[in-house]
Amino acid sequence: MNCENIAVMISAYIDGELPKIEEGYLFTHLGSCSECREEFKAQTSIQHEVKINQKEVSLNFEKKVFNSIMKSKKTTLRGWITRPTPAYVNYALGALIILILVISWLQVSSLRQDLNLFQKRYEASLMQMNYQASQMYQMMNSIPAVEIKQY
Ligand SMILES: [Zn+2]
């Protein structure tokens, strides 16, 4: 049996696909051929590392899955605690603010109207007072001069 066949047998053995009878041949050869022994060692160590990596990968994967589950649980929990205010509340608040603004604007404008009215009334009364004053002056001027007698 040559060494090339042994290499194939080694990989078959590692994959667990080597029949028991051929296993005997393989180990007999390995006992006498140091090159194939090295090959066997190298392949088994590779296989070992592959298995370890697979294990690590699967462990990491499990960890990731676990973490993502925990995260989603946490976020749902947090979502319940700091639940965003429902849209209708925001709409109601917005409507309330707009209502308050409108009311205050109306109040200001009505106040302004009152001020205008007051100003107009004030001006009217001022004009009236001026008119009355001028009438009084006219009346007083029309009165004949009063002589002040000296005793
Ligand atoms: Zn050999």
Image (cartoon, rainbow, N blue to C red):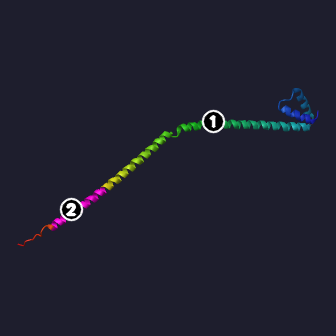
Q: Give the quadrant of residue 120.
A: bottom left
Above or below — where is 151 with respect to 67?
A: below
In the image, residue 128 lies in the stretch drawn in magenta: yes
Residue under numbered circle 2: 132
* Residue positioned 92% across, 33% down in the render: 29
Residue 39 spot, x, y in % from top left: 87, 38
Amino acid bearing label 1: Ile
Q: Pointer 2: residues within 10 angstroms few (<14), some, or many (20+)?
A: few
Q: Nearer the viewer, residue 60 or 114?
A: 114
Q: CA distance from mark 1 to mark 2?
A: 93 Å
Residues in magenta, as a range: 118-141
Residue 96 spot, x, y in % from top left: 43, 44
Task: Please state, as top left, top right, bottom left or bottom right, where the C terminus lies in the image.
Answer: bottom left
* Residue positioned 19% across, 63% down in the render: 135
* Residue positioned 16% across, 68% down in the render: 141
Residue 130 spot, x, y in % from top left: 23, 63
- What predominant SS class does the magenta segment belong to? helix
